[in-house]
Amino acid sequence: MTTSELTLPTTAEAGPRRRRMLGAGKQLNAGPVTYVVLTVFALVSLAPLVWTAVAASRTDRRLAQTPPPLWFGGNLFRNLQSAWDEAGLGTAMLNSTFVAGMITVSTVLFSTLAGFAFAKLRFRFSNVLLLLTIGTMMIPPQLAVVPLYLWMSDLGWSNQLQTVILPSLVTAFGTFFMRQYLVQALPTELIEAARVDGASSLRIVWHVVFPAARPAMAVLGLLTFVFAWNDFLWPIIALNQQNPTVQVALNSLGTGYVPDQAVIMAGALLGTLPLLVAFLLFGKQIVGGIMQGAVKG
């Protein structure tokens, strides 16, 4: 075919095509409706936290009146001090930080390794094991409370923090989450190239798998930390007020003939602050990791 036989696009055809190519890299601008919707969602999401702070700054008598208060009062620091002293939140904060940190590190590490094995390694009964792992997510955790408590009692770990940490070292959700991410984000050719270069399995995991899985690991770490910090059912069974986590300690504020609702709200506010601080410190990295994973997909 000669050059004269080539069919060149006409000016009418080239114009729209050129505009599409030039507009492909542009970022879409949000309209006023988008800002209104986002503002409404932000206000609705912040409303429970704001109400907790308002209630924590009032007296119990004022909270019982109608209509309820809608603005801050002057008793916030007094109620915070009362909740801190009555619930022993100093020890509880340290225990919850240690428990949630250990669970987060172990869950992210083991889930990433297991997810990589299910996603990229070929071994016998891999599909069966994956189905069994997913199937455990359908079992209500309440069914495991009694046998788990008996097991921990036989080990002599009653009222010790390892009783809360050990059952949550790895989760089926974390394994499935990391497996689904690594199937798309980690090319098999990259692993094969590393093996050709003589890299060991440990080196492949450290230099190939972990960098590729970093966005998903950040998201899983945040979700795991929040869940471990807020966990109430198993810690209230396994621990007591002498060695509590935050949620167990806050449970003591609701006891008594007439619980002080303002002090309870102050305790709940104190228990929520570490999560807010963690998100403020690492939220940018986590959101960046989510966006990076979205771009890769």
Image (cartoon, helix red, strand yellow):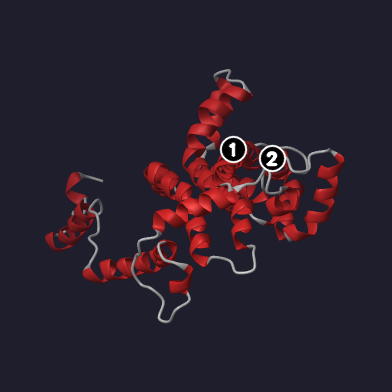
Q: How many marks?
A: 2
| Residue 54 quadrant | bottom left
Residue 1 visible here: yes
Query: Identity of the amino acid at label 2?
Result: Leu
20 or 171, nearer to the observer: 171
Horizontal and vertical percent position of residue 217:
52, 41
Is 282 on the left-hand or right-hand side of 201? left
Q: What secondary structure is found at the residue carrying circle 1?
A: helix
- Residue density around tag 2, few if under 14, some if 14–19, many if 20 or more, within 10 Å: some
What residue is shown with label 1?
A: 98
Circles 2 and 1 in contact, beta carbons < 8 Å:
yes
Horizontal and vertical percent position of residue 6:
21, 50
Is 146 on the left-hand or right-hand side of 201? right
Determine whether 23 is above or below 71 in the image. above
Sequence-wise, which precedes: disc 2 or disc 1? Answer: 1
235 or 263, nearer to the observer: 263
| Residue 191 quadrant | top right
Residue at the location (58% across, 66% down)?
259
Horizontal and vertical percent position of residue 261:
52, 66
Query: Identity of the amino acid at label 1?
Result: Phe
Which mark identifies residue 194?
none
Determine whether 253 is above or below 215 in the image. below
Which mark identifies residue 161?
2
Q: What secondary structure is found at the residue carrying circle 2?
A: loop
